[in-house]
Image (spheres, helix red, strand yellow):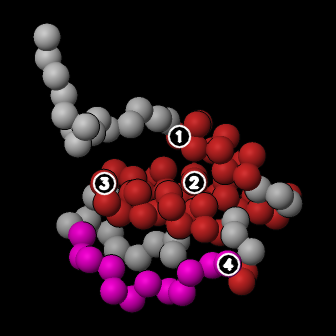
Amino acid sequence: MTHTSPTALTEPTWNWDYLETVFEDLAQTPAEKAAVLHLVSVTREMSPYLSKLDLLREIICIGLVLLPEHDRPPNAEHLRPSISLVSGGTC
């Protein structure tokens, strides 16, 4: 019997359709819906050039677009560098 430790994490299985569905459900206005679907599309196109860390950042930042203006975090200037070929992004 194989025992895995509680700290052993597996990579989640998801696809872009799941991500679009989640953000589409969270969008409260037609403008938000259009914005997040556009951002998911652009992120999908850029994903081959992003590290896993940068891809995760982009996905999280898409969700932040849906927050009310007063709930948005300040621009993060002190992010750890990544190894992706493309820098910059949604946040």
| Residue 1 spot, x, y in % from top left | 14, 11
The quadrant holding residue 73 is bottom right
Q: Position of residue 34 (x, y in %)?
A: 75, 58
Estimate the spatial distance between the alpha carbons at disc 4 and disc 1, rounded to whole Å.
Answer: 26 Å
- Discs 4/1, front: 4
Type of amino acid under label 4? Asp
Q: Which residue: 67% across, 78% down?
A: 71
Magenta span: chief secondary structure: loop
Where does label 1 land, which residue? 16
Q: Closer to us: mark 4 or mark 3?
A: 4
Kindly check if marks 1 and 2 are in contact, taking CB atoms under 8 A apart as contact. Answer: yes
Where residue 22 sits, quadrant-wise, is top right
Say which residue appears at 35% left-offset and 63% top-offset: 54
Residue placed under numbered mark 2 in the picture: 40
Question: Is 26 in front, or is 20?
Answer: 26
Mark 2, mark 4: which one is toward the viewer? 4
Q: Earlier in the sequence, mark 4 or mark 3?
A: 3
Q: Residues within 10 Å of mark 4 (few under 14, many from 20)?
A: few
Q: Circle 3 sits on which residue?
A: 52
Amino acid marked by disc 3:
Lys
- Which residue is denoted by mark 4 in the rendering? 71
For the magenta stretch, what is the residue range? 71-82
Number of other residues with Cα within 10 Å of mark 3, as a class: few under 14, some 14 to 19, many 20 or more: some
The reply to whether discs 2 and 3 touch (Cβ–Cβ < 8 Å) is: no
Q: Is residue 76 magenta?
A: yes
